[in-house]
Image: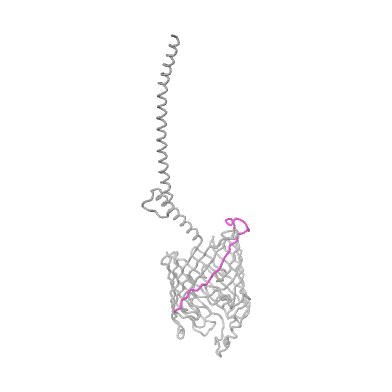
């Protein structure tokens, strides 16, 4: 009996246990089914994402934006295009940094009023165009270099040297020698390289107050020597050749450049700005002369010039520049056409004495060689238009004396350099040629100026029997 009870209890217990276990099994099967469903959904989503990613990758590999491609790709391409445009603009700015260009156009109309203009040109019109560009040329250590190029063209010779005068009435004229007046071929006037070397060597260039300059190439020597603040730019200031540069160097030709005014050469300079704004400098230049100035001969017997200069502040802090120089031309040309060594010394001062008044002075002395004149002095002033309510205008006045040499005075009556049987000068020179100039520069805007001009030459060529020469003109100048 007891055995039956125990057997019956076991069965009941087993049934009870089965009833309890069945809901757990069912719950587990349901959970597994749900997990399987989610895995399948996830797999489908992954496949969809992979398809979208493949489409996006394909779209990004195509540089153009199409209407069918994904919106994300279109936006990425738009952003990429904008970034590239910014980078291109930045590269353009970087490539243009340090580049400087200047363009000037000068036109001059002149006429003579003296009675001796019967057999000479009594009225002339000429123009000249100049374009310059300065390009950075990289660095050597902490030294910076740049290239400079100057292009020039023009037509018309102007009044030049009427009545046998030493100095030309018009320094703005330019025309290739021997060319027709219709020929205005562009000339590469200058092309040179400059290297600026800060001192001390290897130091920080931003903190340097001393440096060395080195130039080599085809150069206008007057860019670096005999400079003057108000008397070295014929496009805006005085136009008589005697007032643009030292007459002994320019008018008498001791500078030795070619017919265009340029020469192959070298320049070394030491500049000290430690006491800025006061500065000091010394420079040495060697330039080709004779046929060598036009690259047709060697560099033998060059034109050598040494200049010491300083920039000062006088008259209550007003700017002034003072230059002293000496030169030697191994191929100087005498007044009779023979070639000889020429040498001399000169000074060039410019000093601001009031807010709107600047004075200039030049003096030259011929120490060696038979020049037509062996001493020259020029001086003058420029007055700013602020005195009369025209701040952009200026009034300039200058006087000059070119003293004939003893050798020229003795030989001028009979010298015949070209051996054609006719005396080259045909008069007995004495005294000096006297030059005067007056101009007014009227500024219409920042690019355009008008300058009426009046000149007078007394005793042209040192000929006291010759009538004086009077010329007036109008210069127009455009700058860009």
The residue that appears at 43% across and 45% down in the rendered structure is 50
> On screen, 44 above or below 86?
above
State the residue at coordinates (41%, 46%): 51
In the image, residue 399 lies at what x, y percent?
A: 52, 74
* Pick the front one: 256 or 434: 256
Q: Decide which of 278, 57 is in the foreground and name it.
A: 57
Where residue 34 sits, quadrant-wise, is top left
Give the image location of residue 182, x and y in percent.
Answer: 44, 79
Residue 267 falls in image quadrant: bottom right
Judge whether residue 274 can be spotted in this image: no
Q: Residue at x 45, y 9 (%)?
A: 2
Numbered range of the magenta stretch: 182-208
Tell me: 390 left or right of 198: left
Q: Position of residue 362 (x, y in %)?
A: 56, 72
The correct choice, above or below, for 96 with respect to 411 in the image is above
Residue 430 visible to an observer of this rendering: yes
């Amino acid at each position: 009996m007891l055995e039956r009870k125990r057997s019956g209890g076991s069965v009941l217990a087993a049934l009870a246990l089965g009833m309890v276990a069945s809901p757990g099994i069912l719950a587990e099967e349901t959970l597994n089914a749900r997990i399987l469903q989610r895995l399948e959904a996830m797999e489908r989503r992954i496949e969809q994402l992979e398809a979208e990613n493949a489409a996006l990758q394909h779209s990004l590999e195509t540089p153009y934006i199409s209407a069918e491609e994904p919106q994300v790709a279109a936006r990425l391409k738009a952003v990429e295009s904008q970034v590239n445009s910014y980078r291109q603009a930045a590269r353009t700015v970087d490539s243009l940094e340090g580049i400087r260009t200047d363009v000037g156009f000068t036109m001059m109309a002149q006429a003579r009023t003296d009675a001796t203009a019967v057999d000479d040109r009594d009225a002339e019109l000429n123009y000249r165009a100049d374009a310059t560009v300065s390009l950075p040329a990289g660095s050597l250590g902490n030294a910076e270099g740049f290239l400079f190029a100057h292009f020039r063209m023009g037509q018309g010779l102007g009044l030049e040297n009427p009545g046998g005068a030493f100095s030309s009435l018009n320094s703005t004229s330019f025309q290739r020698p021997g060319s027709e007046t219709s020929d205005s071929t562009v000339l590469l006037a200058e092309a040179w390289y400059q290297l600026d070397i800060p001192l001390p060597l290897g130091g920080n260039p931003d903190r340097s107050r001393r440096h060395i300059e080195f130039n080599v190439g085809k150069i206008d020597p007057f860019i670096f020597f005999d400079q003057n603040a108000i008397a070295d730019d014929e496009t805006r200031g005085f136009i008589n050749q005697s007032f643009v540069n030292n007459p002994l160097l320019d008018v008498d030709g001791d500078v030795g450049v070619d017919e265009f005014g340029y020469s192959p050469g070298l320049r070394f300079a030491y500049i000290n700005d430690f006491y800025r704004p006061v500065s000091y400098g010394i420079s040495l230049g060697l330039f080709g002369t004779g046929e060598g100035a036009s690259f047709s001969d060697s560099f033998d017997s060059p034109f050598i010039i040494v200049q010491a200069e300083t920039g000062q502040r006088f008259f209550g802090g007003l700017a002034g520049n003072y230059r002293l120089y000496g030169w030697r031309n191994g191929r100087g040309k005498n007044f009779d056409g023979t070639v000889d060594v020429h040498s001399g010394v000169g000074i060039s001062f410019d000093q601001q004495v009031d807010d709107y008044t600047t004075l200039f002075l030049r003096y030259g002395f011929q120490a060696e060689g038979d020049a037509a004149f062996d001493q020259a002095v020029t001086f003058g002033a420029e007055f700013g238009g602020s005195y009369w309510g025209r701040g952009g205008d200026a009034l300039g006045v200058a006087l000059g004396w070119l003293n004939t040499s003893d050798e020229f005075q003795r030989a001028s009556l009979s010298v015949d350099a070209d051996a054609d049987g006719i005396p080259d000068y045909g008069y007995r020179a004495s005294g000096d040629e006297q030059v005067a100039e007056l101009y007014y520069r009227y500024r219409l805007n920042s690019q355009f100026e008008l300058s009426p001009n009046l000149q007078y030459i007394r005793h042209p060529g040192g000929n006291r029997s010759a009538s004086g020469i009077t010329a007036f003109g109008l210069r127009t100048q455009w700058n860009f």
